[in-house]
Amino acid sequence: MSLVNYATKEITCKIVYYGPGRSGKTTNLQYIYSRVPWDRKGEMVSLATEADRTLFFDFLPLDLGRISGFTTRFQLYTVPGQVYYNATRKLVLQGADGVVFVADSQRSQIEEDIESFRNLQVNLLEQGIDIREIPVVIQYNKRDLPNVLAIDLLDDELNFREVPSFAASALLGEGVFDTLRSISEGVLRKLAGKLDNTRSRSWRAKGVGNR
Ligand SMILES: Nc1nc2c(ncn2[C@@H]2O[C@H](COP(=O)(O)OP(=O)(O)OP(=O)(O)O)[C@@H](O)[C@H]2O)c(=O)[nH]1
Ligand SMILES: [Mg+2]
């Protein structure tokens, strides 16, 4: 859940990278970490096994500039994609303001992609969130590999909501920042809408605008 601190003029939002095992979630964060100047990022924390599979989560705090006088801070998390870490996925997903679904474009991985997307829907619903209510962006990763499915086909299988989607190769850094920009804009747009509502409600409560 985003935090707006009027005293320090800071907005903090949580974005979760979700998707099946080995789809490239951690690689997205590693690429972002490698490209963001030091004064815009904190330490990246990765809790992984020796084989580099995410065990609990990765965490990367970023400062993405100022909007209307507020510093916008984004906390990027990844979930562990392996099927049996569902309890951890639920924990990491809690309080998310936006989700990047990282799909593996390889033909052989489509069932895992679909299963993971369903799992996302179910885990959000358990937290009382309909997937249509939260900003989601889909990234079709590993486009550099042979035997990838066409984007249209992937869209048919996964993107029934017609959310923004991006072809990417996280390994090469392609599409990584387009994805991040899109989800952060989506999250900030939603937040701005909420703040407007709150403001007009409190104005109404104070009789502002009444004749
Ligand atoms: N060729 C290619 N390999 C990639 C790409 N993105 C990630 N990989 C590789 O895929 C493997 C898994 O990547 P990770 O980023 O660890 O995947 P993950 O989604 O974090 O996996 P879990 O933590 O198990 O959920 C690694 O060997 C990466 O180097 C890509 O765009 N192209
Ligand atoms: Mg990982």
Image: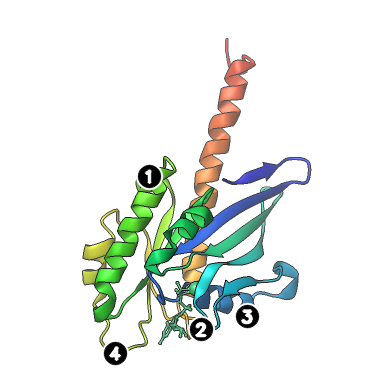
Mark 1 or 4: in front is 1
- Residue assigned mark 2: 51
**CB of mark 2 near ligand 1 (< 8 Å):** no
Q: Residues within 10 Å of mark 3 (few under 14, many from 20)?
A: few
Q: Which of marks 3 and 1 is nearer the N terminus?
A: 3
Q: Are marks 4 and 2 in contact (CB under 8 Å)?
A: no
Q: Position of residue 77 (x, y in %)?
A: 55, 63
The answer to whether any part of residue 184 appears in the image is no
- Residue assigned mark 4: 146
- Residue assigned mark 3: 34
135 versus 24 height, above or below = above
The quadrant holding residue 63 is bottom right
Looking at this view, is 126 or 29 the one in front? 126
Locate the C terminus by quadrant: top right
Q: Where is residue 198 in the image (x, y as percent from the top left)?
A: 57, 30
Q: Earlier in the sequence, mark 1 or mark 4?
A: 1
